[in-house]
Amino acid sequence: MQISLEQMHSTLLKLFLNYGFADAKATLLARTFSESTLDGVNSHGINRVPLFIKYIREGIINIDAEAQLAGAFGLMERWDGHGGPGIVNATKCTTRALELAKNHGIGLVALRNTNHWMRAGSYGWQAAEAGCMAIMFTNTTPNMPAWGGKESRLGNNPLVIAIPRDGGHVVLDMAMSQYAFGKLNEYKLAGKKLPFAGGWDQHDQLTRDPEQIISTMRGLPIGFWKGSALSMVLDMLAAVLSAGESTSSIADKQMETGVSQVFICIDNARFGDGSIRESVLRDIIEYTHRSTPIAPGMRTYYPGEKTRITRQKNLKEGMMVDDGIWEKVTALAGD
């Protein structure tokens, strides 16, 4: 079915208020989940709302808690999320990293003891809209084998890189697995196979079946051994910088919680060369856009370009939402 942005936002706002969130937090949550869906990321937008509510009901997420400063070291800070909602904590820490960047040119906030931040790209877009470049990442529960191993020992540890530009921000949002597990669930709901192998089945064979990969929790690292290595070092950086938990300790929990995250922002204005930056970015994008399509109907995009296209389409036509998911959400909201 197709849902308008306004309808989704009002339904989610009612839901979060009913679950006891303060007005400001309920509004932030409703906006973030709705905007993620607007941008076509249903896997970490509307599709995640029922699981988010389950975490609240089971006491994993403390709706009244939010990140607080645990230690300051000049342009670097450590924050403790106290088990609060991941969206609230990540938004607050991005805001603080932006403040540090505006004051020092660069700012780093490392966050521990938080929950899933949902769409990682939300915070890259937040930074880009504020005129800052950003590098952000998180660790997760184990859902991907280290290259050469069988059992999942790594998280798919999403990475965000944002670069603001006048012609449309560049925002890379990617997991270290070929497909994020939310995306696997999206394919599962649609009853579709993956375009490419995304992980291993119970017989240790690579498969395009999302349901089998979800069952084994053995995603395929991007770039094989390279994605495996990158996942591991992102986990190390997140845990060490935040003095928080690593994927290995998150593995001991029944549900994913207590993750560690890093937010780095860089103030472009400090360099005083905006026209040069815009020219360089435009040249890179135009050079890539001039690529010969490998097949009819295909073309190249810069990271974030398809998001802008999807956003405009969904604003005009409404957002496609799985019927079953929407029924669950509206039931939770009491509609």
Image: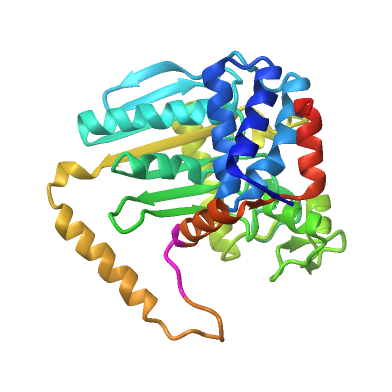
* x, y percent for residue 77: 37, 24
* x, y percent for residue 245: 58, 29
The residue positioned 60% from the left and 25% from the top of the image is 85
Q: Is residue 73 visible?
A: yes
Nearer-the-camera pick, 299 or 152: 299
Q: Quadrant of the C terminus?
A: top right
* x, y percent for residue 5: 59, 42
Q: Residue furthest right?
A: 203
Indicate left or right for 9 with 217 as reference: left
Indicate left or right for 231 with 304 as reference: right
Is residue 154 depicted above or below 254 in this figure? Answer: below
* Magenta stretch secondary structure, dominant: loop
The residue positioned 57% from the left and 17% from the top of the image is 82
The residue positioned 44% from the left and 32% from the top of the image is 241
Nearer-the-camera pick, 3 or 201: 3
Q: Is residue 218 visible?
A: no
Nearer-the-camera pick, 184 or 18: 18
Q: Quadrant of residue 168?
A: bottom left
Q: How many marks?
A: 0
Q: Which residues are magenta?
A: 300-305
* x, y percent for residue 329: 76, 35
Indicate left or right for 122 with 163 as reference: right
The residue positioned 72% from the left and 22% from the top of the image is 56
Nearer-the-camera pick, 212 or 24: 24
Indicate left or right for 4 with 78 as reference: right
- Coloring basis for residues: rainbow
- Whether the magenta-drawn stretch holds residue 47 is answered as no
Q: Quadrant of residue 246?
A: top right
